Image: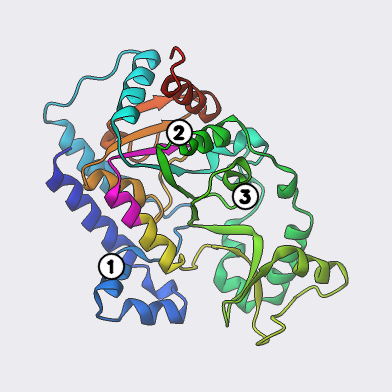
Amino acid sequence: MRAGSVQSLARHAAGVWNGASSLLLPWAAQERSATSPRSRLTARYIAPRESPGSSVDAPFLAVFREEKATPRRPTLATVTDQLATVVAWLRDARRVLVFTGAGISTESGIPDFRGPNGLWTKVDPSRFTLQNFVADSEVRRESWQNRLHSTLEEARPNAGHRAVAELGQLGKVGTVVTQNIDGLHQLAGSRDVIELHGTTREAACLSCRRRLPIASVLDRVREGDVDPHCEICGGLLKTATISFGQALIEADLIRAHAEASACDLCLAAGSTLSVWPAAGVPLEARRSGARLVIVNDGDTELDEAASTVIRGRTGEVLPALVAGLSGAQV
């Protein structure tokens, strides 16, 4: 893809994100209105998490379809050829960024969001927006009961998580950027993990931003405190995940984009790349000249921007890449 086309795509995405600014928390909106270089970067990339149905497929694909009118690289013939090619790219790469989504954790028994058996087939996401959480004590009580009875802590890393950690041990991957909230990358051994959508393993005060272990808050819920508040400032406590309508953490997203700008290969695994602004991270890598390798069971919104797309389960493809780097036959 020509650099100009990718830049125009990024500019359009920035416009979509900025158009949602009315949903930002007040402190985030104030930071976005500042004039410092850091705040200008924030204004481009910090916006509320997009909800299901607010997809930006059409404008993205329009740009990619226009690009398809020009000659494109030949498609790699087989998965074996693709694996061998990506292994060679990994060997040549000096700085690799891994970006992961829900698909890498489904093999650990954690459902994705948009699949046939995904979370949104069982729960109405519009009920659990940040705005509803703040305004409605019943939503808060229901949220804490859902968290109390969640089985996330029982999940364990699978072969895909372990392969990402091994890529780090081989000196190829420094940073992992994930949309997942389950902490399985860290349990598998990855050291530098940016959790763009937060974590279920902590709680956060929406007023003073204090973080505390989720276990301590769940103990209070078990003991009858069905709507726990911060013991320091009295603010609302919430699981430290990013809800729809809630701004992503500024420092996390800025660092993720800095890593994307600096890498020479981005490996996006287990994500449909349809939730923004998180999906802008691999796009930023591509825009900055890096190769983009997508590994996913189904189509993604950035397939046509990728250097290659491998259709398959992350728990099979990622270990094969590690085996290739380690000298085993791919």
Q: Earlier in the sequence, mark 3 or mark 1?
A: 1
> What residue appears at the point 24 percent right and 73 percent down from the top-left corner?
37
Residue bearing the label numbered 3: 182
Foreground of the two, 186 or 277: 186
> What residue appears at the point 51 percent right and 34 percent down from the top-left corner?
166
- Cβ–Cβ under 8 Å for marks 2 and 1: no
What is the span of residues highlighted in magenta in the rendered image? 257-270
C-alpha separation, residue under disc 2 versus residue under disc 3:
24 Å
Q: Neighbour class for label 2 at 10 Å: few (<14), some, many (≥20)?
A: few
Q: Amino acid at mark 1?
A: Leu
Identify the mark at residue 41; answer none if there is no mark: 1
C-alpha separation, residue under disc 3 versus residue under disc 1:
28 Å
> Magenta span has 4?
no
Q: Earlier in the sequence, mark 2 or mark 1?
A: 1
> What residue appears at the point 54 percent right and 44 percent down from the top-left corner?
190
For numbered disc 3, what is the local secondary structure? loop
Horizontal and vertical percent for residue 303? 33, 34
Q: Amino acid at mark 3?
A: Asp
Quarter holding the C terminus is: top left
Q: Amino acid at mark 2?
A: Leu
**Residue 257 placement: quadrant:** bottom left
Identify the mark at residue 170; answer none if there is no mark: 2
